[in-house]
Image (cartoon, rainbow, N blue to C red):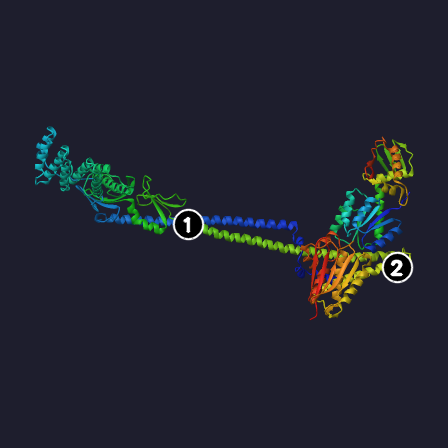
């Protein structure tokens, strides 16, 4: 029967409900080491996998970016090639090439450009006839040989009235010069103004208007009329830049340099000038190339990127000995024609000419990922380098993936750790339960073995007849009776607890005079433990409410509390038992002067198998189920059991029972 | 010459102690009962016992602690652990701490008696028939003491005193303990007698009695034999 009770008590399913003391929750060292090793290996594998996964993700992302760049490069090459081919096919009829470009048509004796005025100077200027210098000989003799400027002025003023614009222009130039020499500056200014009215009339290897306006600027400088000078020079410069006159390079450079002496230029206009100069230089180069072609050298048709004046000019041409049609375009033309396509593709394009000059500005930052198309691979005059327009965005996308991946992996890591923690906790609990069960079996075994030992030894002595003294023999019988009662009580206690655990304990509630019941239990206990040296002081309040209790269960609960009080306070004889009314409830208090119970153990000691630290420290005997039984029995009465204790100051256990009604 | 062996029984269960006391006395042993670990240590250090019967579950200080403390104090008295604990680890712990034997409850009284006898015999056998230190030979079988091969004239009390020192060699012994060991309990002699006997013994066995080499004074305690 006892074995059955033990089996019920230590049945593992129910044991799981046991809450253990904190120290019992601590897993054994080897389990902890094993858990940490497994966790460390799991987390290490996870970290390694994460790292590998991230590497693969990075490689995949780089590959994806590279593929995008390669596709974009193919598209750009195709669109550029198609675009240039289309222009080449339309070169002969190209009248409006667009901004930053120029269509050019060369004939043996002519140069034609569209739009007009975009060329600063021309590679070829047809010879024009000027007036004969003989008509001016008389005036120039006066001017240069006799320094008779007045005479010369008169002579040239007369000629200036000529109907022939060539003579008139020649005369006005000379008249102005002599007036200047004669210090008639204002008159000279008026003459140059008149000369300017003759427009492009050739004079002195130059054009009348250009020559007049420049001379006028020089005079204004002499007069120190600076604001007027700025205005005049600015106007002249603007006309020079707009190609108002067909000039050759020498003439343009001369006049341009002269004007620049009087003006200061803003950087943006300088850039414009450079662009226009580069176009003009490219056309000049094209002219020279055509001249070579006409001599049978070079390609009649082609594409070329020419680096002039710090800029790259695209040249497309189609020629025959009689004619050349071409397009000259600056970098901004390329931007305006194809830039939107590149932007739509989300890439930055850099074009490098054969000398590795960067055609487009600004030069994009170097990138580890790029797609290259060399000029030998394409029919284009550049090497193309395609990079991502927004590398940061691509990388942000990558880092977004990485963050997501890392978050997932971190979550997995946390789950491994949390899972490990709960597994360890569960294992710890199982181990603790197992340890508690082992302790319980050991304690019960001890509790059985002790009275059995004395019974065996006492009966052996009696049997051997070594106890001859009658008093001594009576003492033996009393000891045997005591041990028998002790065993009986132990078996009963275990059986009761087994029934309680199995839910089979039947309570029989009946009206009971609690004062009598408590008095009987204390008296019986006093008798049983008379030899312990303890003194039991009972105080009873007789004004108690009526109660219905299970006599046996409540007696057992009180007995257990008294038993604990005796066991835990050796050498401290006083034990107090108070029975008192507390409102509608009745309190049964058992107070001892034992070592006390630490606060952290006060809740745990009511759990089965749990024994406080004092039990371990003082080798106090017991099974660890006494207080669990008390709690169960008191709860069955609708009451509660409390403990108040501080280490070194004894303990007070209180059973609180509700009054009837 | 046979003396009555003294056994210290350390048992907190009154009924078991009662049975043990009567049984062992019947067997001719001098039995002393104590009920807790602290008192057990005190008595084992104060008096000389031939055997200690030691329970494990004791108030104040358990049997394992008592056993360890006694061995640390160089008490060589045989210890027989007596306990209701049956786990192998506990038996091993007891033996490792210095116990000489282990009997689990409920024991057979007959077996217990046999084990006690065996332990006492073994302890007696541990002393050689002839014990030598320096040029001195103590022949326990012939009850003689020789020095440099020459037989010394020695009284029975001096011989018992010397034998007690040899049994407890290396351990400081109080005058009371020496009285117990050499004269037996219930003999009323003064401490001065012990000192006189030791002075006589020194004259016979020490190379220089004024500067003893073997029987040394232990200030505030008594004497110690370093042989």
Q: Which residue is mark 1?
A: A394
Is residue B140 visible from the viewing direction of this image?
A: no
Residue B208's x, y, as percent? 85, 30
Find residue A103 and report its horizontal and vertical position in percent. Answer: 23, 46
**Separation (CA) of disc 1 from disc 2:** 102 Å
The answer to which of B68 and A643 lies nearer the viewer is A643
Q: Residues within 10 Å of mark 1 (few under 14, many from 20)?
A: some
Check whether the beta carbons of the residues at disc 1 and disc 2 lie within 8 A of each other.
no
Subunit of label 1: A
Q: Callout 2: 10 Å neighbours few (<14), some, many (20+)?
A: few
Name the residue: 55% across, 53% down: A414
Mark number for residue B51? none
The quadrant of the image that shows the N terminus of chain A is: bottom right
Q: To which quarter of the image does residue A428 belong?
A: bottom right
Task: Identify the mark nearer the N-term, 1 or 2.
Answer: 1
The chain under label 2 reads: A
Question: On the rendered structure, is A363 left or right of B56?
Answer: left
Q: In the drawing, does residue A112 fall left or right of residue B134?
A: left
Split into 4 quadrants, where in the image is the C terminus of chain A?
bottom right
Front of the two marks 1 and 2: 2
Judge whether residue A355 can be spotted in this image.
yes
Q: Position of residue A324 (x, y in %)?
A: 21, 44
């Amino acid at each position: 029967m006892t074995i059955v009770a033990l089996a019920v008590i230590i049945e593992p399913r129910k044991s799981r409900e046991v809450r253990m003391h904190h120290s019992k929750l601590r897993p054994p060292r080897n389990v902890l080491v094993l858990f940490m090793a497994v966790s460390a290996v799991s987390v290490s594998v996870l970290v390694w996998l994460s790292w590998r996964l991230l590497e693969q993700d990075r490689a995949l992302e780089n590959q994806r970016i590279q593929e995008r760049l390669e596709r974009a490069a193919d598209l750009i090459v195709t669109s550029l090639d198609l675009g240039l081919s289309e222009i080449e096919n339309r070169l002969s009829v190209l009248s409006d090439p667009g901004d930053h470009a120029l269509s050019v048509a060369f004939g043996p004796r002519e140069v034609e450009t569209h739009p007009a005025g975009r060329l600063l100077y021309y590679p070829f200027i047809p010879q024009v006839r000027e007036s004969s210098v003989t008509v001016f000989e008389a005036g120039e003799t006066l001017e240069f040989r006799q320094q008779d400027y007045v005479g010369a002025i008169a002579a040239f003023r007369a000629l200036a009235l000529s109907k022939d614009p060539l003579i008139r222009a020649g005369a006005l130039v000379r008249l102005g010069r002599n007036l200047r020499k004669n210090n008639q500056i204002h008159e000279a200014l008026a003459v140059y103004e008149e000369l300017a009215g003759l427009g492009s009339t050739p004079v002195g290897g130059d054009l009348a208007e250009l020559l007049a306006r420049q001379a006028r600027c020089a005079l204004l400088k002499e007069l120190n009329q600076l604001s007027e000078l700025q205005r005049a020079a600015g106007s002249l410069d603007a006309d020079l830049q707009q190609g108002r006159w067909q000039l050759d390079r020498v003439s343009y450079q001369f006049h341009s340099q002269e004007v620049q002496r009087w003006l200061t230029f803003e950087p943006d206009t300088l850039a414009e000038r450079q662009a226009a100069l580069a176009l003009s230089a490219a056309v000049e180069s094209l002219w020279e190339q055509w001249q070579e072609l006409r001599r049978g050298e070079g390609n009649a048709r082609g594409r070329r990127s020419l680096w002039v004046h710090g800029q790259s000019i695209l040249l497309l041409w189609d020629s025959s000995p009689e004619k050349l049609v071409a397009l000259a375009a600056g970098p901004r033309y390329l931007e305006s024609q194809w830039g939107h396509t590149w932007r739509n593709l989300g890439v930055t394009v850099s074009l490098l000419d054969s000398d590795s000059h960067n055609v487009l500005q600004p030069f994009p930052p170097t990138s580890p990922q790029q797609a290259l198309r060399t000029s030998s691979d394409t029919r284009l005059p550049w090497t193309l380098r395609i990079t991502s327009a927004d590398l940061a965005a691509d990388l942000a996308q990558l880092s977004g993936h990485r963050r997501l991946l890392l978050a997932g992996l971190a979550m997995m890591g946390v789950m491994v750790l949390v899972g490990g923690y709960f597994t360890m906790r569960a294992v710890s609990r199982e181990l603790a339960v197992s340890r508690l069960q082992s302790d319980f079996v050991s304690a019960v075994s001890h509790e059985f073995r002790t009275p059995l030992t004395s019974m065996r030894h006492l009966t052996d002595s009696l049997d051997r007849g070594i106890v001859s003294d009658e008093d001594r023999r009576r003492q033996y019988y009393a000891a045997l009776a005591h041990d028998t009662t002790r065993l009986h009580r132990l078996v009963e206690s275990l059986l009761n607890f087994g029934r309680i655990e199995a839910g089979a304990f039947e309570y029989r509630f009946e009206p009971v005079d609690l004062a009598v019941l408590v008095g009987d239990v204390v008296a019986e206990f006093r008798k049983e433990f008379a030899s312990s040296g303890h003194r039991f002081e009972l105080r009873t309040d007789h004004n108690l409410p009526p109660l219905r209790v299970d006599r046996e269960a409540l007696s057992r609960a009180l007995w257990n509390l008294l038993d604990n009080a005796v066991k835990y306070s050796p050498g401290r004889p006083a034990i107090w038992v108070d029975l008192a009314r507390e409102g509608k409830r009745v309190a049964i208090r058992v107070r001892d002067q034992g070592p006390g119970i630490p606060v952290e153990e006060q809740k745990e000691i009511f759990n089965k198998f749990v024994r406080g630290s004092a039990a371990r420290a003082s080798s106090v005997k017991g099974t660890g189920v006494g207080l669990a039984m008390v709690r169960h029995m008191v709860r069955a009465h609708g009451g509660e059991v409390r403990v108040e204790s501080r280490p070194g100051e004894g303990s007070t256990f209180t059973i609180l029972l509700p009054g009837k009604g | 010459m046979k003396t009555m062996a003294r056994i210290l029984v350390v048992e907190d269960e009154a009924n078991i102690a009662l049975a043990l006391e009567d049984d062992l006395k019947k067997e001719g042993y001098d039995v002393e009962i104590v009920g807790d670990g602290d008192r057990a240590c005190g008595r084992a250090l104060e008096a000389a016992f031939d055997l200690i019967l030691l329970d494990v579950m004791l108030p104040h200080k358990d049997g394992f602690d008592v056993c360890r403390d006694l061995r640390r104090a160089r008490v060589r008295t045989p210890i027989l652990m007596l306990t209701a604990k049956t786990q192998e680890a506990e038996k091993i712990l007891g033996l490792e701490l210095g116990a000489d034997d282990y009997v689990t409850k409920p024991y057979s009284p007959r077996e217990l008696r046999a084990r006690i006898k065996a332990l006492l015999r073994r302890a007696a056998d541990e002393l050689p028939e002839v014990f030598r230190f320096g040029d001195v030979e103590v022949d326990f079988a012939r009850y003689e003491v020789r020095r440099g091969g020459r037989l010394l004239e020695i009284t029975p009390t001096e011989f018992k005193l010397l034998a007690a020192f040899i049994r407890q060699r290396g351990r400081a012994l109080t005058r009371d303990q020496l009285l117990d060991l050499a004269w037996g309990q219930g003999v009323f002699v003064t401490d001065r007698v012990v000192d006189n006997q030791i002075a006589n013994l020194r004259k016979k066995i020490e190379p220089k009695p004024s500067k003893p080499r073997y029987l040394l004074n232990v200030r505030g305690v008594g004497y110690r034999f370093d042989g």
